[in-house]
Every structure is written in C-alpha cells, then in structure tokens.
Image (cartoon, grey):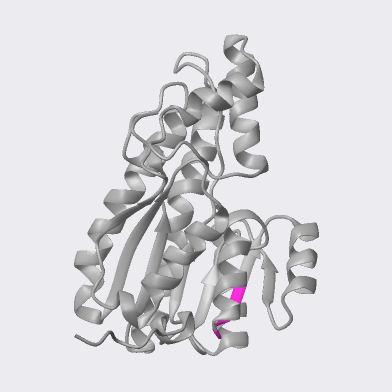
Amino acid sequence: MSKAAPVSAADFLSGLGNQRVLITAGASGIGFAIASTLSALGARVAVCDVSEDALRHAKASLPGLIACRADVSSETDVDAMFAVVGNELGGLDALINNAGIAGPTGGVDEIAPSDWRRCIDICLTGQFLCARMAVPMLRAAGGGSIVNMSSAAGRHGYAFRTPYSSAKFAVVGFTQSLAKELGPSGIRVNAILPGIVEGPRMDKVIRDRAAQIGMSHKDMEERYLEKVSLRRMVSPYDVASMVAFLLSDAGSNVSGQSLGVDGNVETL
C-alpha cells in the first residue's frame, strides 16, 4: 500500500492564514510564544499586556503586531482593548484567554483575602470579561474559536496554592459551559491545561515553595518533576502548538475539551 505524501506544517494547520486573533498577556511567556507561532502561520495578531516594556519588545520582535496595554480584570481596560481590536483588525476570529497570575503561596489561614480576590479576578473573571466582548465579534465573523488557559492545577488539587487551583478548576467549567452555549453559533471553546512550564514564573513558584518549607531550589524542582511522567518541564512553544492546532482546520471538530500539555502531571 502506498503511503500518503508528507504535508508541511502549514498545510496540516490550514485555515490560520489571515485569522484575526487576540491574545491576552501576549507580550511574554506563553502568550508571546502563541503570538509568534500564529504570526508565522499567517494569522493577524493583537496582544495585550500590563507591561509596557514587554509590549515594546513584542512589537519590535513581531512586525505588524497590534499591541495595547490592558489589565484583564478591569472592565474599562477590556472594553477599550476590544475597541482597538475592532478598529485595527476589523473583527475577530479567535480569542486566546491567556492572562493569569500565580497567586499567593501559603496555607488557607495565611492567605490575605485581597490576594485571593486578585488571583480570581485575573485568572477567571478576566476570561469572562474578554469572552463577553469577543462573542458578538465571533458571531459576526460567522463563528470562531475561544481557547481558555487553565492548568494542571485545574485537574489536580494544589495544596498551598488554593486561589490559583480554584480559579483554574473554574476555567474548565467556564469552558465546558461556553462550548455548549456557543456551539450552535459555530464557536468552538476549549481549555488548555499546561503543566510545569519553564520560565521565570515557574522559577518563582518553585522558589517560594522551597523557601516556605526550607528546601533548596534544586531539590524542590526535582520534587516537582518527580510528579511528571516524562520528568521534564514543557516549553511555552509546546502550548503554542496546541493553540495552533485548535484554531486550524485540523481542530474544527474539537470543542468543550480540556487538553493537557504537561508531560502527564500525575499529581501536584
């Protein structure tokens, strides 16, 4: 039996050319990896971030990138951001709800209510504020895609990180609910659950937990990786590849799913 001819990544991930995509917290880390990947595949990309320095770097690195400052927990900022996106892109085909923070590390009796609220506001409420503005634009485009960033902590309980884990569990419920609500409009909604993603944010999480229990950073990192079947961290570009698949024609019948990109995190 003859084998099918190999196809290029661009052929396999067809349908991304000229897609209009908004990525929250898209100027660094996972968000910038997504922006770079989608731009390389022909999408028209807009990002927001709270860091002016990160936005300047992102614009210098990706010519044609639309960038604006916005805190996704602020309704005013989100409304202004979507006005910019509408004017600059003329519509929207996909929203990547990537913005989030690690939140506080500590026992439930040690966490300040203000820190709890801030984590929930950014990791969960921010996704709602962006989705409510994106959906009319996606409907006007005849359908599209929303990708919500959850976490392996949205599948496993995470001791001493209760605000973060609670928000990320809620993102999964938000995703499944939106997939049912928006499917008849041709809008697909999925969640990605990254695991231990290499970079400054994870370094801080490991450092904070190590300091809390009096362990070295190296030993704490090894303890984290012992719980990952592949015994390694994932790259931001591993997550970006999954986003590209979900937005492409190859992912056209994937909706309501929670997709781990984590090397199989067994527990936290």
Left or right: 93 in relation to 200: left
Q: Position of residue 104 (x, y in %)?
A: 56, 28
Q: Position of residue 241 (x, y in %)?
A: 47, 66
Relative height, residue 82 to residue 264 (above, below):
below
Q: Residue at x 32, y 78 (%)?
A: 250
Q: Which residues are magenta?
A: 42-46
Quarter residue 57 falls in: bottom right
State the residue in front, 151 or 122.
Answer: 151
Residue 161: x and y in percent read 47, 27
Residue 20, can we see it? yes
For the N terminus, the image quarter is bottom left
Identify whether 29 is placed above or below 59.
above
Give residue 134's position: percent from left, percent from top. 43, 73
Q: Residue at x 63, y 63 (%)?
A: 32
Q: Nearer the viewer, residue 243 or 117?
A: 243
Dividing the picture into quadrants, the one containing residue 52 is bottom right
Q: Residue at x 54, y 45 (%)?
A: 197
Q: Quadrant of the C terminus?
A: top left
In this rendering, the answer to whether 79 lies above or below 203 is below
Q: Is residue 80 visible?
A: no
Foreground residue among 170 and 201: 201
In this figure, what is the number of numbered marks?
Answer: 0
Q: In this view, which residue lies farthest toward the top?
A: 214
